[in-house]
Amino acid sequence: MPIAQLTQAERDAALQELSGWTLREDGLAITRTLKFADFSEAFAFMTRVALHAEKADHHPEWFNVYNRVEITLSTHDAGGLSARDVDMARFIDGIV
Ligand code: H2B
C-alpha cells in the first residue's frame, strides 16, 4: 500500500519540532549530522537505530566515517517525506 507524503503544512510543523534536522534541497528528505566521541560510540548509536529500523520496517540512509554519522531520512515507498521519517527522527533525537 502506498504511504502518504507529508503535506507542506505537516512538513513545516515537523521541521519546527525537529531541531537539528534540515530539509534537503529537493524537499524529499531530512538530514542531520551527528558527532560522537569516537567510532565505538558512533557505531553503538547506529546499532540502536538499526534495531529500531528493523522493528519499524523503516531504514535510514547514512554515511559514517570514524565519529561522524550523516543521516538522511526519506520514504522510498512515498517518493518523499512521510510520517515514518518524522517518527524515525524523533527516535534518533531521543537517544542522542
Ligand atoms: N525504508 C525507507 N526509508 N523507506 C521505505 O519506503 C522503506 C524502508 N520501505 N524500509 C520498506 C523498508 C519496504 O521496502 C519493505 C518491503 O517494507
Image (cartoon, rainbow, N blue to C red):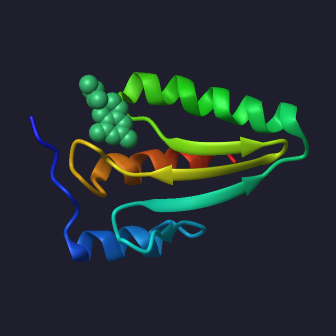
- Rendered location of residue 33, percent (x, y): 67, 58
Q: Residue at x 33, y 46 (%)?
A: 84
- Whether residue 21 sits left or right of residue 96 in the image: it is left
State which quadrant residue 48 falls in: top right
Q: Is residue 28 above or below residue 51?
A: below
Report the quarter where the N terminus lies. top left
Q: How many tags in the picture?
A: 0
> Which quadrant does ligand 1 occupy?
top left
Q: Is residue 95 visible?
A: no
Residue for point 50% across, 43% down: 61
The correct choice, above or below, for 27 with respect to 79 in the image is: below
Q: Quadrant of residue 40?
A: top right
Task: Say which of 83 and 17 sits in front.
Answer: 83
Residue 6: give x, y in percent of width and height: 23, 62
Q: Give the residue drawn at x 45%, y 76%.
A: 16
Left or right of 33? Residue 18 is: left
Q: Position of residue 12 (x, y in %)?
A: 34, 76
- One can see residue 5 in this view: yes
From the viewer's side, name the closer residue of 61 and 12.
61
Whole-percent x and y of residue 57? 35, 28
Residue 58 lies left or right of residue 19; in this view the side is left
Residue sitting at x 64%, y 45%: 63
**Residue ranking furthest to the right:** 37
